[in-house]
Image (cartoon, rainbow, N blue to C red):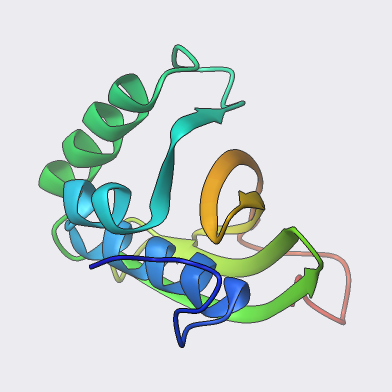
Amino acid sequence: MEVSESYAMSKKEIAVSFLERVASGDVRGAFKDYTGNDFRHHNPYFRGDPDSLMIAMEDNAIKNPDKRFEVKRAMADEETVAVHSYVRQNPEDAGAAVVHIFRFESGRIVELWDVGQPIPENPVNENGVF
């Protein structure tokens, strides 16, 4: 699949599709279809190259075949997209609120940041995390 500025998907749709495919285990396909040659990421637990992150994501998909991923909101501003989501490693997991921030160049993802907040069993805030 060729992704370019003229491609029918918006950057927001590309970012969401990338995350959904990664969560479902199609890690290499998501990277192939949506990331640029100069892709880099800022997850502090893995080296900054694409292969290190792909391997970690594949390992996570194998260990958590029942992972749940639910987009709560996505926002786009020119070359930047932010996706706020609810991620659970399995149906019984309380999960985490996660924000992925993508930077695009020429319609492809070239940079990725992610931050997460575990959801406590008994949150004090009556509004919830979402």
What is the x, y in percent for residue 27?
23, 50
How many numbered dots are placed on residues in this image?
A: 0
Vertical order, 73 against 87 (above or below): below
* Residue lying at 17% horizontally and 56% vertically, measured from the top left: 25
Closest to the observer, 99 or 94: 99
Is 16 on the left-hand or right-hand side of 101? left
| Quadrant placement of the N terminus | bottom left
The image quarter containing residue 83 is bottom right
* Residue lying at 78% horizontally and 76% vertically, measured from the top left: 128
The image quarter containing residue 92 is bottom left
Is 50 on the left-hand or right-hand side of 55? right
Closest to the observer, 54 or 14: 14
What is the x, y in percent for residue 72?
63, 81
What is the x, y in percent for residue 101?
68, 51
* Residue lying at 76% horizontally and 64% vertically, measured from the top left: 123
Is 79 on the left-hand or right-hand side of 24? right
Closest to the observer, 69 or 19: 19
* Residue lying at 50% horizontally and 17% vertically, measured from the top left: 48
In this view, the residue farthest toward the front is: 6
In this view, the residue farthest toward the top is: 47
What is the x, y in percent for residue 10?
57, 80
| Quadrant placement of the C terminus | bottom right
Vertical order, 47 against 70 (above or below): above
The image quarter containing residue 73 is bottom right
